[in-house]
Image: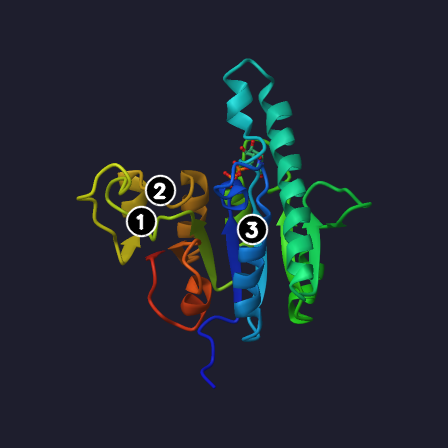
């Protein structure tokens, strides 16, 4: 049997992925679909960590523009990611996966606190870990949490899920049909051109720590599995 290229991966799902297209804040169909996709790679023995965003419920900046205290609003965003993490955990378990949700803001009744060594222990035991509450610090994003946690747990790659866009383009492909997709792009070029990989703080962190990122279309069934098995899909962002 073909061996996977990666043994330990971190998947970043934004709130938009969990929202799906059916108008609900959390889409059951999307949760089921994502759980299936994660199950497909888990069956190959790949260790999977998932960082979930919260933008389908709350984004810090949204309220700051209306005069809300910034830190207060960011904490609300972090709490939103916990709601999504619990929904994702439920879907993964319904699909037969063993999981642990871990939070960067303690919430003992609903999830474990994030402790790095415990997180890697869960991965070694074959549990999918869902990392919630971002970094636990206001003013950051779950992109930064994905980068930070990937470095901490020695994930070999960060898979940045996008809804309907199959990589990094030189312009917005939804508005400009002439936009072209990169197979590979260097961190610095992506940063300099302001391309939508992840936010610039997170991307700089990945560059400094030499963490490869693959941007892919999460709506295309089987994509995560193809990536894990070594196929070149989407855009690789690296040195
Ligand atoms: N957030 C934060 N610190 C973190 C991660 C997230 O303050 O380490 C807040 C921030 O306000 C952000 C919100 O939580 O807007 C939701 O996260 P994010 O925007 O990254 O979610 P996504 O865009 O991936 O759905």
Ligand 1 quadrant in view: top right
Whichever of labels 1 and 2 marks the residue nearer the N terminus, that label is 1
Q: Residue 46 location in percent, x, y?
A: 55, 71
Position above or below: 102 against 195: below
Disc 2 packing (10 Å; few <14; some 14–19; many ≥20): some
- Dot 3 falls on a residue whose secondary structure is helix
In three-dimensional space, the C-alpha distance between marks 1 and 2, rounded to whole angstroms, equals 7 Å
Whether residue 128 sits left or right of residue 194 in the image: it is: right
**Residue 155 circle label:** none
Q: Is residue 232 above or below residue 16?
A: below
Residue for point 75% across, 42% down? 106
Q: Which residue is mark 2?
A: 196
Check disc 1 and report the residue beneath it.
168
Q: First in sequence, mark 2 or 3: give its number.
A: 3
Label 3 neighbour load within 10 Å: few <14, some 14-19, many 20+: some
- Observer-side mark, 3 or 1, equals 3
Cβ atoms at labels 1 and 2 below 8 Å apart: yes
149 vs 179, left or right, is: right
Corner quadrant of residue 104: top right
| Looking at the image, residue 9 lies above or below residue 208 | below
**What element does badge 1 sit on?**
loop
Q: Is mark 2 within 8 Å of ligand 1?
A: no
The picture quadrant where one finds residue 68 is top right
| Kind of element beneath mark 2 | loop
Q: Residue furthest bottom?
A: 1
The residue furthest top is: 67
How has the structure been colored for display? rainbow
* Of the image marks 3 and 1, the number of the one nearer the N terminus: 3
Q: Residue at x 54, y 50 (%)?
A: 30
- Check disc 3 and report the residue beneath it: 29
Q: Is residue 153 visible?
A: no
Task: Say which quarter of the image contains residue 176.
Answer: top left
């Amino acid at each position: 049997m073909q061996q996977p290229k990666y043994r330990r991966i971190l998947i970043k799902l934004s709130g938009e992925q969990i929202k799906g297209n059916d108008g609900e804040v959390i889409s059951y169909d999307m949760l089921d679909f994502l759980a299936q996709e994660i199950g497909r790679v888990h069956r190959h023995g790949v260790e999977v960590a998932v960082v979930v965003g919260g933008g389908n419920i709350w984004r810090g900046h949204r309220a700051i523009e209306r005069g809300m205290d910034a830190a207060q609003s960011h904490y609300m965003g972090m709490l939103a990611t916990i709601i999504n993490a619990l929904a994702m955990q439920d879907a993964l378990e319904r699909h037969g996966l063993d999981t642990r949700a871990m939070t960067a803001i303690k919430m003992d009744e609903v999830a474990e606190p994030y402790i790095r060594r415990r997180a890697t222990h869960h991965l070694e035991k074959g549990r999918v870990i869902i990392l919630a509450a971002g970094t636990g610090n206001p003013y950051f994003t779950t992109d930064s949490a994905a980068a930070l946690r990937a470095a901490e747990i020695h994930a070999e790659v960060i898979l940045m899920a996008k809804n309907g866009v199959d990589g990094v383009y030189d312009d917005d492909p939804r508005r400009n049909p002439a936009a072209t997709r990169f197979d590979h792009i260097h961190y610095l070029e992506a940063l300099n051109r302001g391309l939508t990989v992840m936010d610039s703080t997170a991307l700089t962190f990945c560059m400094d720590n030499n963490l490869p990122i693959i941007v892919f279309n999460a709506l295309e069934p089987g994509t995560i599995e193809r990536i894990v098995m070594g196929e070149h899909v989407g855009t690789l962002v690296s040195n």
